[in-house]
Image (cartoon, rainbow, N blue to C red):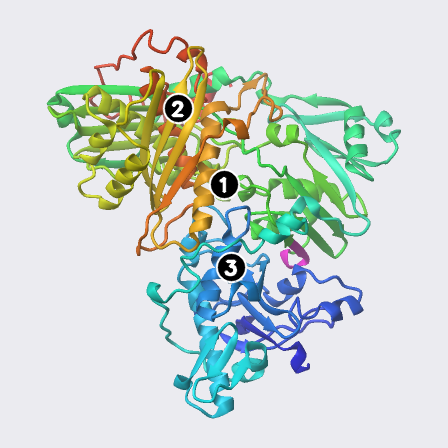
Amino acid sequence: MTRRDSVIRLIDPAALAPLSRRQLVTSCGGFLLSFAASPLAAKAHAKSQGEEPSLKKIQSETTPGSHKGYDGFKPAGFIRISKPDGIVLIIPNVEMGQEVYTAEAMLIAEELEVGLDQLRVIPAPPNEDLYTQPILKSQSTGGSTSVRGAWVPLRQAGAVARTMLIGAAAAQWNVPTSECFAKRAVVTHRPTGRTLAYPDLGEAAFRQPVPKQITLKSPDQFELIGKPLPRIEGPSKVNGTAQFGIDVAPPGMKIGTVMACPTLGGRLIDFDDRSARAIPGVRDVVRLADAVCVIGDHFWAAQQGLRALRIRWDDGPNRDLTTEILENALKAASEHGKPVLARNQGDVSGAFERATKKLEAVYQLPFLAHATMEPINVTVHVRPDACEVWVGTQVPTRAQNIAAKMSGLRPDKVIVHNYLIGGGFGRRLTAEYVGQAVAIAKQVSYPVKIIWTRQEDIHQDLYRPAYYDRISAATGPDGLPIAWIDHITGGSVMGRYLPQGLAQGQLDTDAVEGAAELPYDLPAIHVDWVRADPPIPISWWRGVGPTHNVFVVESFMDELAHAAGRDPVEYRLALLKQDPRAANVLKIAAEMADWGKPLPQGAGRGIALHNSFASYVASVVEISVAPTGEIALKRIVGVIDCGQCVNPDGIQAQMEGGMIFGLTAALFNKITLRNGRVEQNNFNDYRMMRMNDTPPVEVRVVTSREAPGGVGETGTVAAMPALGNAIFAATGKRLRRYPFDTNALQNPHADRTTLSQSVPVAPAPKEELADSPSLFLRAGL
């Protein structure tokens, strides 16, 4: 191996294994700087051997069996430096528009002492040993945890590598390391001005001892972190070179499109494909247990062939399922199901007995689809001894394992190439579509790209659960709550997601997140959850539990403020004396939004506050409501305290996008069923907010030295209740379910909503059932 091919790598000794000349040499040495042809540095060699460089090169280096790599002193696979390719960072989290490539590169580059203009990033291959995320405990991207989990380890990785590079330069010059410093990938000897570039220090750095302790920069020393820097992948998205999963085109590839049984849970009986095969360009028709796929030379041929099929379906057990049945089952579960305790603090019953006023409300939330801009797509090539998958996924190892199981190969025989994702929102935290694509690809000899149409993407989504919540409060003479009860009812996403499921009676913490822990000082609080799994697939959705719970909590908090005759901001501040960070964002948002400034009749402002994903967010939405009930958004204000920010420009963009995403759902979106089939088809009946619907959005990022919090989902959580509260302020009508019914807002001042003055004192339900899913059987499912 020549010096030209040397590369700095951080690899565990357990990764050592003999490989063929068509694979990369695997390194050894614990947390050492060792040398081999890197995936990028070996580009010319790979082409000379008839190989295209790809992530399978990296995968051969990062074989399973090594120690956990997500550790600052064992950052295996995060940093590679070579003469031909410069500085390459392997980013452990997946880029889906949330700017994680840039943020995590900034963490490494800050301590490595390189500029973002000096490096390139590529996504990490599937490897739980190296890339297990410390918060989610898996190699996955979600829950607004990426920067939170990477904040210390990735900076440590950069600092350790920099220390060893400086040590190598000092040894070569025979000078103390204290006389040397690193800047922009160059080590300089201060007294003499001598310099060595990072790639020239490779072999010498390999022989340096690994520092057992390092000192990270303090915030006042940051040169990158905290600066509004442009996205690393931004230029490629502008010039069209960015590669998303749907852009993949390996040699010989055909394109297929699929239709699963439109009745959820149904099966395929048979089909007549003679008309489909007669269409020019159609190559194959593939059968699965619950779906059929037509493959063609191009998507148009495949789509026309699918439309020409004559298919007979077995509609299965959900043939009569409707939204009304599902809603009735949720209501029955709420009233009669067996609750799981989430929090019980203080004397709730006693507080209700001595209350000045008692208030209660019921909130209902619909099923929601993800509707990402890039529909589901996977490209697969199955060969006798290997399976290659090209996909954009939030869970690369999960995708790999599913492909292995479906193909019958060992996981190490499955190569997963991960790409930019055109919108995740939690949809790509699952990978069942990878299994479907592999099942199809097994039946043909060529690579096949499976693309779901928009209709299929909505019809076969894994939906955000519907919820039915009963919430109540007892207030004292000042109108402030002295007791709070929140009965939450809905399906268990964790129960569907975890391989082992969730035992009956076990709390799904996601189901109560945003309800069990509040920023407010409540003397007595009871929160419980009734599990009522629907007979349709459910999964994560942007904002997960808090998008549901914060809507209920903040809407009801607004109800309490109005019932007490107190300003909603002042009312909340009275409950935030123990939480200055929450009070601070609330005050800033109110000031930015001109809270209290008079508005014309039919206009209103609504405010909401939450602390979710280790961040604090306050939002204000200003609207006007026409006599016809039409809602016009006038202004959106968001304030976030997410602790130490990495890239404020990215935070602002995520807040803006998140709030628009949340407002879109609150105004337009729901998934409904009739005869077991999803009624929505495309963006015509599952609407997105359009440019002319969108008002000015103002975001302020609070300066903070606290540990970083999450960002990507916080805006979505904040937007929905702020809009609902604005509707009440403008019309006097409280809408407790979304999408908000504009018909209920016609003649907005005709009557005022009256809150119930009676409330059940005891938090226990009327009747306990051993197994709440049986409620769906009682409801006729």
> Local crowd at mark 1 within 10 Å, few (<14), some, or many (≥20)?
some
Residue 411 screen position, x and y as percent: 63, 56
The image quarter in which residue 638 lies: top left
- Residue that appears at 72% across and 56% down: 386
Determine the CA span between mark 2 and mark 3. 45 Å
> Local crowd at mark 2 within 10 Å, few (<14), some, or many (≥20)?
many
First reached walking from the N terminus: tag 2 or tag 3: 3
Q: Which residue lies furthest to the bottom in this view?
A: 174
Query: Marks 2 and 1: which is nearer the front?
Result: 2
First reached walking from the N terminus: tag 2 or tag 1: 1
- 653 with respect to 310 (left or right): left
Badge 1 is on which residue?
497
Nearer to us in this view, 732 or 373? 732
Residue span colored magenta? 411-416
Determine the CA span between mark 3 and mark 1. 20 Å
In the image, what residue type sits under mark 1? Answer: Tyr
Badge 3 is on which residue?
131
Residue 538 visible in the displayed image = yes
Residues under numbered marks 2 and 1 in contact, where contact means CB atoms less than 8 Å apart = no
Q: What element carries label 3?
A: helix
Indicate yes or no whether the magenta region holds residue 415.
Answer: yes
- Residue that appears at 23% across and 19% down: 359
